[in-house]
Amino acid sequence: MSNGERSPAALIVGLILLAYAYIISQAYVDLPSWTHAGKAINTHVGVAWYAGLVVAIFGLWNLVQPLAGTKLDNVLRAPMAGIGYIMILAIVVRYYGEPLFKHWGGLAKPSLGWDFSSVLNFNYVLLGIIIGIILTNTIGIPKWAAAGVKTARLALKTGVITLGAMYSLTELAYLGQLSIVMIGIFVLGTTIMTLWLGGIFGTDRSLTGALSSGLGVCGVSAIVAAAPVVKAKSIDMAYSIGTVLLIGVVFLFIFPPVGQIFSMTPIQFGAWAGTGILNSAQVAAAALIYDPKGIDTLKVAEIFNITRVLFLPLIVIILAVWFAKGEEEAEAGGKVAIGKVLIDKFPVFVLGFILMFAFSSTGVFRPAGYELYRAKSYNFTAEKNKDPKKHMISAGDAEKLTAFLATATVDGILGRLLYRGEAWSLMRQEGVLPPNAPPLGPTIETALAEHGFALLRGAMALRAKAGAS
């Protein structure tokens, strides 16, 4: 949208979002069951309502008064149509694209023997990047949306800043020094080696930086977090994500038999898989392949995998310094001191990330009486309860839980039970409860929240015993 032009684009896009929100909120259209729209309908409709309202207001302004090239016009009015365009694509990918791939994965599982959507981790982040690349290289970005699409990098940087609030030094205390050292050596070693190999083979620095974060930390999430730091383009992110997921699929099938060959214990295999396999879904799948009847392997694997994520702040800082130093040396034609790089080139938004991480470590963002990762989730020994009858569930509730586990998607449940207490509510929200699941009262919900691991072990043991008999 150029200066002096009256464009209806933003108004049209805003009205489309508003119309969509109204149709969905009034249930004029029955959404397919595979969308699981019921569990997120308020968020679904709310995003469309608010985004549509804001875009439509600015669109009406743009239609009545042409752009004059002022700072307000360039920052707010001109990008609004493109922002609405991005919101439409985001809604399609998040609420329809990802559920559709999960639905296809479930349909293909009886034939393939595995759920490709879970193993390949076709989530909305990956799908959004793929769809964006396809649209850009086929129909292209509409002229009226170009200014708004450029704001995506600003949104990504803002997201990285707020991401810092999710990490804390507190969780590291639960793992023990040896575990932290092992994970730290892997994360730092993999990141540094990838950067070194990228330099030897002359790979583009943005691609090398994005790939090193994905291989070193936690796959897709780390790539997305590091992308603005190393100025990675969408194609760099796509290559990095594709590489990480391919490696994860290969490791998924290699790790379990290797663990069997070396007679690894559940804890040993869990620590190895959680450290070596990048994607959390693939970690869970490998742990369940290795030990389908127990939970100790999965528990340890996911804890180690989660702990790798805690190194993300350090890796972001390392990549920021590495990339900025390379740019400065390219401009200066020689070596540049790291101190000069930190002052002149260090990304300001990374400082915001570090600040949020520091606040999180001091407990600023933590509600009173709440631990982000409960200590019992990191306890690899048997739970000790002074009064076991206090939270004991009835035999009838135990049978209901066993019946549920026999029909539910177990691998979809366990990952969420590992470090969160909202066990049953998460099962319900994620749509993994079967339609014929018996109603469960507050007693079992409380017991699951406080002693999820012990209950699951007992229920799965009952299930195995019933199958043996």
Image: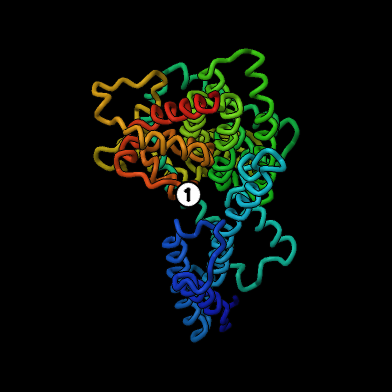
Residue 242, quarter of picture: top right
Looking at the picture, how far across and down is residue 13, in whole percent?
Answer: 55, 75
| Residue at 54% over, 28% down | 467
Is residue 2 shown above or below 134?
A: below
Residue denoted by label 1: 436
- Number of numbered labels in the structure image: 1
Nearest the viewer among 184 and 105 is: 105
Residue 118, quarter of picture: top right
How has the structure been colored for display? Answer: rainbow
What quarter of the picture does the N terminus occupy? Answer: bottom right
Q: Amino acid at mark 1?
A: Asn
Nearest the viewer among 88 and 337 is: 88
Nearest the viewer among 275 and 416 is: 416
Residue 281 visible in rendering = yes
Looking at the picture, how far across and down is residue 106, in whole percent?
Answer: 63, 47
Looking at the picture, how far across and down is residue 258, in whole percent?
Answer: 67, 19
Label 1: few (<14), some or many (≥20) within 10 Å? few
Residue 77 visible in rendering = no
Residue projecting furthest to the front: 469
| Residue at 47% over, 62% down | 44
Residue projecting furthest to the bottom: 64
Assign a secondary structure to mark 1: loop
| Residue at 60% over, 50% down | 102
- 110 horizontally vs 455: left or right: right
Is residue 259 shown above or below 321?
A: above
Is residue 152 shown above or below 393?
A: below
Looking at the picture, how far across and down is residue 12, in whole percent?
Answer: 55, 79
- 81 horizontally vs 457: left or right: right
